[in-house]
């Protein structure tokens, strides 16, 4: 989960930051946090409420892509280093 979290939303190179903030300009800020003690992953974003549904769909797509293994070896190696 720690590695998954880093790839998903724990850095400026993360999937959420690059795809939702940079490419789509949907969020002012976006990240994910893994709470090991509770075994939960929290995604937080600073957004305009008018884009809520589009942003939710975009986040879910990123989650599905990661679940299906859509990440590069470079992303995996960088996450391991962090």
Image (cartoon, rainbow, N blue to C red):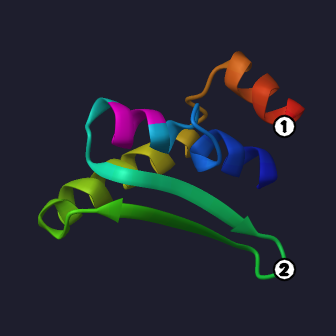
Residue 78, quarter of picture: top right
Rendered residue at 26%/36% (across/down): 24
User: Does the magenta-highlighted stretch encompass residue 17?
Assistant: no
Q: Nearer the viewer, mark 2 or mark 1?
A: 1
Answer left or right for 51 relative to 14: left
Rendered residue at 42%/53% (across/down): 29
Q: Residue furthest left?
A: 50
Instruction: Name the residue beneath numbered marker 1.
Output: 82
Q: Position of residue 57 (x, y in %)?
A: 28, 55
Q: Position of residue 39 (x, y in %)?
A: 76, 75
The one nearer the camera, 51 or 61, is 51
Q: Which residues are magenta?
A: 18-22
User: Does the magenta-highlighted stretch encompass residue 21?
Assistant: yes
Residue 13, quarter of picture: top right
Q: Is residue 74 above or below residue 54?
A: above
Q: Is residue 30 above or below residue 15?
A: below
Answer left or right for 68 relative to 73: left
The one nearer the camera, 66 or 34, is 34
Residue 73, quarter of picture: top right
CA neighbours of label 2 inside 10 A, class few (<14), some (14 to 19), many (20+): few
């Amino acid at each position: 989960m720690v590695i998954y979290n880093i790839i998903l939303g724990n850095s400026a190179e993360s999937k959420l930051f690059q795809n939702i903030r940079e490419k789509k300009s949907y969020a002012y800020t976006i990240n994910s946090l893994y709470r090991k003690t509770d075994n939960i992953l929290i995604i937080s974003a600073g957004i305009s409420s008018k884009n809520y549904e589009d942003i939710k769909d975009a986040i879910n797509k990123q989650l599905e892509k990661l679940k299906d293994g859509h990440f590069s070896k470079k992303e995996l190696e960088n996450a391991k280093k962090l």
